Amino acid sequence: MLGTSLEDISKSFIKRNLTETEFKETFRKVLVSFQESSVDCLAISYEGEEKGMKSKKWTLLATSLTAMVLMAACAQSTTTSNTNATTNSATTTATKTNQLSYFTEKDYDTSYDESTASKIELSGSSANVSGDGVTVSESTVTITNSGTYVISGQSDGVQIKVEADKSADVHLVLKGATMTNTNAAISATSAGHVYLTLAEGTTNSLSDSSSNSDEKADAALFSKVDLTINGKGTLNVDGKKNNGIKANDTLHITGGTYNITAVAMPLMSMMNSTSLVRP
């Protein structure tokens, strides 16, 4: 029987040979318990063999783990508080943390100057772009420089690619953007760090399709590099092929409201480190 408190869920992940159903249900409970608790920061880290994971995906992800530990304390603990999980009426003890000791200032920085930012205005099967560092060719928008890019509008079949220098910090701002695409709606394959901000008061949606043909970017939102998502907006994600949000490096989430539907993992970090902090 899988646990329902953060502490019990932690013990469940240490168990080996979880079935796909057990693994997915446990991960779902992690997110629910975190949302309902007063824990400031939750780091999810895995340690195990990754050999063969590409071909067997869920099977090896569930069975080859030597340990999977949920750390309610992302850094040295500062205070302890009792929290009540309303879904199961159980009172558990959790640890509050010093957020800044784990995340960088940039992880929290949601500011941007729209007057100087480049613009990507989605429109049907294409987009209109303005400013430096961004070009559009038919249904593909490509970002090649560091900078801030404000994305708005609605599209069907458009993909935004980030192909910047490996030292570039790319700041994407979703400001009322709705994107559906066959493959990942946003795919960042090269950059130093991608920061994605959900503009306050906006609702944004990203979706791929069940026919997504990119095995590496099998998600609605994909990043091969470090990815941080912040802001005070809402992000709806529909991972119809496999994952919702996938990062090959670290994945930090420091703000926003999320509604994620996925065939497999809602949040996936191939570097085995997913960190969330309560806004």
Image (tube, rainbow, N blue to C red):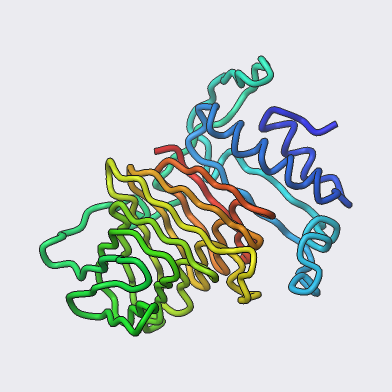
**Percent of width and height locating residue 19:** 86, 49
Comparing 180 with 146, the one in front is 180
Picture coordinates of residue 2, whole percent (x, y): 80, 33
Q: Nearer the viewer, residue 182 or 242?
A: 182
Q: Is residue 94 above or below residue 172?
A: above
Q: What is the quadrant of the N terminus in the image? A: top right
Q: Residue at x 61, y 68 (%)?
A: 218
State the image quarter where residue 48 is shown: bottom right
The reply, left or right, for residue 50 in relation to residue 107 is right
Up the image or down, 264 lies above or below 181; here it is: above
**Residue at image x 74%, y 50%?**
68
The image shows residue 79 at horizontal and vertical percentages of: 49, 28
Is residue 73 positioned above or below 95 on the image? below
Position of 163 compared to 51: left or right? left
Q: Residue at point 78% right, 74% down?
A: 55
Residue 74 occupies quadrant: top right
Residue drawn at 73 percent across, 40 percent down: 26
The quarter of the picture where the C terminus appears is top left
Q: Is residue 253 left or right of residue 59?
A: left
